[in-house]
């Protein structure tokens, strides 16, 4: 009922672990598959290892999660070894993820990560938390996204997915620029910029002051982004942002998503959330007489 084909690859269900939630370790990624994910995305990695921002880097509130982890990662060479180990543990589709400070560096990291047995490569041009080092995210500019997509596409040996930012007011135009430049798919969305302030200390809670907001509060924003992008492009979209339940997941499919990225829901509902979301989707589909996801993909556009 939930089996999904995405760029010629079969996923047992459309739920994909979102990037950055369980790192790049083979054991953690394999655990997510055991917990019910149809596929997994590894944490974004860079050319060199990064320690990220000082603590506190994350905070969970009733309706949202906020983080400014600062893209801490072991570097692409170490990640390649972990991703090889993952494929020994699991046959599940694997999405690698990279980021870099310049288009040229994106090309170098692409070449390196393609030594790993990844099925797809996600390009993180949209992290809102590292602007002090890298300037504003590339995902805010059609020109930058076009240049990076072309550079990556020229080096990648697997289909590429450009990950977009909900902070870009013209996300659909950015999506079109990525498609025109050769992207095979899109992921929408990364976290949206935000901050939290402690009223007693009168100070921002995160050390980085600002962070990226995810979880339930992001869902309506992500739905609108996916809805707008679906209208503008033909390539498939991984709808990501705030999905915590079967209802959320089906709504994202109706906005036009092909696959569903799930991240912060692990914080809100525990590691078994992937299986729970699938069960809830199937229950609603049975009640509504929906035989498969193709029947309802993009359904919200016909009203
Ligand atoms: C702690 C944390 C770390 C993240 N790290 C990355 C990352 O390395 N690369 C990336 O593309 N997105 C990263 N994200 C964004 C998620 O992949 C996802 O796009 C976002 O959290 C929205 O989905 P959600 O509401 O289901 O969490 C991170 C999110 C969180 C909460």
Image (cartoon, rainbow, N blue to C red):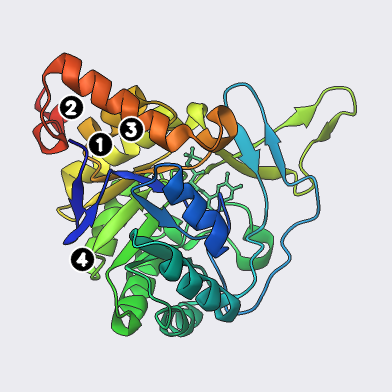
The answer to the question of whether label 1 and label 4 lie on touching residues, with beta carbons closer than 8 A, is: no
Q: Residue at x 20, y 47 (%)?
A: 4
In the image, is 302 to the left or to the right of 174?
A: left
Mark pair 1, 4: CA separation: 19 Å
The answer to the question of whether label 3 and label 1 lie on touching residues, with beta carbons closer than 8 A, is: no
Instruction: Name the residue that disc number 3 marks.
Output: 278
| The disc label shown at residue 84, or none | none
Front one among 234 and 277: 277
Instruction: Name the residue that disc number 2 marks.
Output: 300
Viewer-nearest of discs 4 and 3:
3
The answer to the question of whether label 2 and label 1 lie on touching residues, with beta carbons closer than 8 A, is: yes
| The disc label shown at residue 180, or none | 4
Give the percent coordinates (x, y) of residue 201.
Answer: 90, 28
Crowding around mark 1 (Cα neighbors within 10 Å: few <14, some 14 to 19, many 20+) is many
Q: Residue at x 62, y 60 (%)?
A: 71
Q: Residue at x 28, y 52 (%)?
A: 173
User: Mark 2 or mark 4: which comes first in sequence?
Assistant: 4
Give the percent coordinates (x, y) of residue 58.
Answer: 70, 42
Residue found at the very far right of the displayed protein = 201
Give the percent coordinates (x, y) of residue 176.
Answer: 24, 57
User: Mark 2 or mark 1: which comes first in sequence?
Assistant: 1
Mark pair 3, 1: CA separation: 22 Å
Secondary structure of the residue carrying numbered label 2: helix
Instruction: Name the residue that disc number 1 marks.
Output: 227
Can residue 66 be seen at all in this image of the molecule?
A: yes
């Amino acid at each position: 009922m939930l089996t999904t084909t995405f760029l010629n690859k079969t996923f047992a269900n459309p739920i994909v672990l979102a990037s950055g939630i369980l790192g790049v370790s083979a054991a953690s990624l394999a655990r997510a598959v055991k917990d019910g994910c149809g596929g997994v995305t590894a944490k974004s990695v860079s050319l060199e290892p990064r320690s990220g921002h000082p603590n506190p880097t994350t905070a969970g509130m009733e309706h949202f999660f906020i983080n400014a982890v600062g893209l801490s990662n072991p570097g692409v060479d170490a990640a390649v070894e972990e991703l090889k180990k993952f494929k020994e543990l699991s046959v599940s589709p694997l999405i690698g993820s990279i980021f870099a400070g310049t288009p040229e560096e994106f090309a170098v990291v692409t070449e390196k990560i393609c030594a790993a047995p990844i099925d797809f490569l996600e390009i993180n041009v949209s992290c809102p938390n590292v602007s002090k080092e890298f300037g504003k995210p590339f995902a805010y500019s059609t020109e930058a996204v076009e240049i990076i997509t072309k550079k990556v596409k020229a080096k990648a040996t697997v289909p590429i997915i450009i990950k977009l930012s909900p902070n870009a007011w013209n996300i659909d135009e950015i999506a079109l620029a990525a498609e025109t430049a050769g992207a095979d798919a899109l992921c929408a969305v990364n976290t949206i910029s935000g901050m939290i302030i402690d009223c007693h200390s009168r100070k921002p809670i995160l050390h980085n002051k600002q962070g990226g907001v995810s979880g339930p509060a992001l869902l309506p924003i992500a739905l609108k982004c996916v809805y707008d992008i679906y209208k503008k492009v033909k390539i498939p979209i991984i709808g990501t942002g705030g999905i915590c339940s079967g209802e959320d997941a089906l709504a994202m499919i109706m906005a036009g998503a092909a696959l569903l990225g799930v991240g912060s829901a692990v914080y809100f509902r525990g590691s078994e959330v992937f299986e729970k979301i699938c069960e809830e989707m199937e229950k609603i589909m049975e009640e509504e007489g929906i035989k498969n996801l193709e029947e309802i993909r993009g359904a919200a556009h016909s009203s």
